[in-house]
Image (spheres, grey):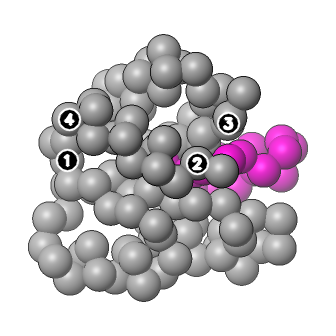
Amino acid sequence: MKHVFVVEDGHAEQKMIEALLKQAGFQVTTSSSVDEAWDKLQTIPPPDLFVLDIVMPGKSGLELCRTIREDDNLKEVPIVFCSSKSEEFDRFWALRQGAQAYLVKPYAPKELLDTVYQHVK
């Protein structure tokens, strides 16, 4: 079973993503902050894909993306950003930091699933 790690501070959105991915047959780990996510990542095998929000309290999803790309165990894991930031520069910058895809909220559940299927190893 493929494992997706979701880092999203919005409770309702986190639960929606988790339910959608579980229904599609994925194992899902969730965190509400970058620090919580990093702590969990030290105790579990690397996931097959990350779904990250960008704007969160404390550290941003972009910071987590950079940290993931610098980690030998995680640097090859695909990253999908889901963000309300819709400017082209935001998408460009997220992809430049090492993400494989960038979805703008609100997105259709099918769009998220299609993107996850496209990038999961």
Identify the amino acid type marked 4: Ala
Disc marking residue 120? 2
Magenta-colored span: 33-51
Mark 2 residue element: loop
Q: Does the magenta stretch include residue 116?
A: no
Gap between marks 3 and 2 measured at Cα: 9 Å
Q: Tag on residue 3?
A: 3
Quadrant of residue 2 in the image?
Answer: top right
Residue 87 in picture, x, y percent from top left: 13, 73
Percent x, y for residue 40? 74, 44
Name the disc covering residue 119, or none. none
The first of marks 1 and 3 along the sequence is 3
Of pointers 3 and 2, the one earlier in the residue sequence? 3
Q: Do the residues labelled 4 and 3 touch (CB within 8 Å)?
A: no
Measuring 60% from the left and 27% from the top, which residue is drawn there?
26
**Residue annotated with mark 4:** 108
How far apart marks 1 and 3 lie (CA) works out to 23 Å
**Residue bearing the label numbered 1:** 105
Q: In which quarter of the image is residue 17?
A: top left
The answer to whether the residue labelled 1 contacts the one labelled 3, judged by CB atoms less than 8 Å apart, is no
Query: Quick one: SS at disc 3?
Result: strand
Circles 1 and 2: CB distance less than 8 Å? no
Q: What residue type is labelled 1?
A: Lys
Dot 1 surroundings within 10 Å: few (below 14), some, or many (20 or more)?
A: few
